[in-house]
Amino acid sequence: MFAFFNKNDPADETDVQLDPNRIPAHVAIIMDGNGRWAKARHLPRIAGHKEGMNTVKKITVAASDLGVKVLTLYAFSTENWKRPSDEVNYLMQLPVNFFDTFVPDLIKNNVRVAVMGYTDRLPAATQKAVHDAIEDTKDCNGMVLNFALNYGSRAEMVTGVQSIAQAVLDGRLKPEEITDKTVDQALMTAPLAPYNDPDLLIRTSGEERISNFLLWQIAYSELVFTDVKWPDFTAATLQACIADFQSRDRRFGGLTDKK
């Protein structure tokens, strides 16, 4: 009945045979299409966000089962505050609901929660939910489920540059000593080392832009854009996106024997 809502689902077109030795260590996803998913069903936008939260639960387990080391999800950007206040309030409640129901499953699957972004600017209840989830899963040593929450890459880079500049002013660093590694360590993904940079970036719902997400870190990431709206994104869709990733020849600016 709803087949026309998702054109070009790679799971429908791909006989997925994954190489378990070439699973991307870090997968990042721009979770897009919740509102359009709801609109297509004549539902309020918040219904799409609620269904999207259920998708996060399914994809977290699927990614962990595949052997992904870090799954970074773009949950709320520094620009999302511009949305209607009712929607923003609902989005701020989502982490509370999510962690309240899902932390036991995260622990069962040995998944550790991490959060990057300007979390000090979130409502108190959201901050508490985030803090509690990080604390409750701190002993898990499997996949890291990393939420970008009140995150924007340009703001992140400005903050990072400020910290590097302060180190120079304090005499702890010379300008000529600044390297890629210096910048890496100044960004919010530093705690994810050695998996700071995504191997694979997926964006759902047919949009083909980065939207201020991990601009430094995706310099050599493989990008996959799918028409599938986030609430309809399944474990099979994830596998198809990873199969696409595995079909590519990653040269990181150099050459391989094939070229």
Image: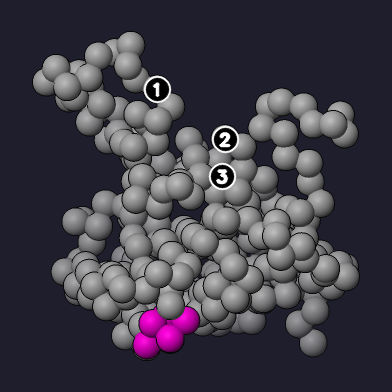
Towards the viewer: 162 or 82:
162
- In primary-sequence order, the first of circles 2 and 1 is 1
Q: Which residue is mark 2?
A: 219
Res 160 quadrant in image: top left
Q: CA distance from mark 2 to mark 1?
A: 15 Å
**Left or right, 8 with reference to 134:** right
Asked whether the viewer can see residue 44, the reply is no
In this rendering, the label closer to the viewer, 3 or 2: 2
Q: Check if residue 34 falls in the magenta segment.
A: no
Tell me where the magenta segment starts and ends, as one range. Answer: 104-109
Q: Amino acid at mark 1?
A: Thr
Q: Which residue is mark 3?
A: 210
Is residue 253 placed above or below 115 in the rendered structure?
above
Q: Amino acid at mark 2?
A: Ala
Q: Which residue is mark 1?
A: 179
Label ID, residue 106: none
- In primary-sequence order, the first of circles 1 and 3 is 1
Q: Amino acid at mark 3?
A: Ile
User: Callout 1: few (<14), some (14-19), or many (20+) C-alpha neighbours within 10 Å?
Assistant: few
Image quarter where the N terminus lies is: bottom right
Asked whether the viewer can see residue 195, the reply is yes
Towards the viewer: 130 or 106:
106
Is residue 181 placed above or below 80 in the rendered structure?
above
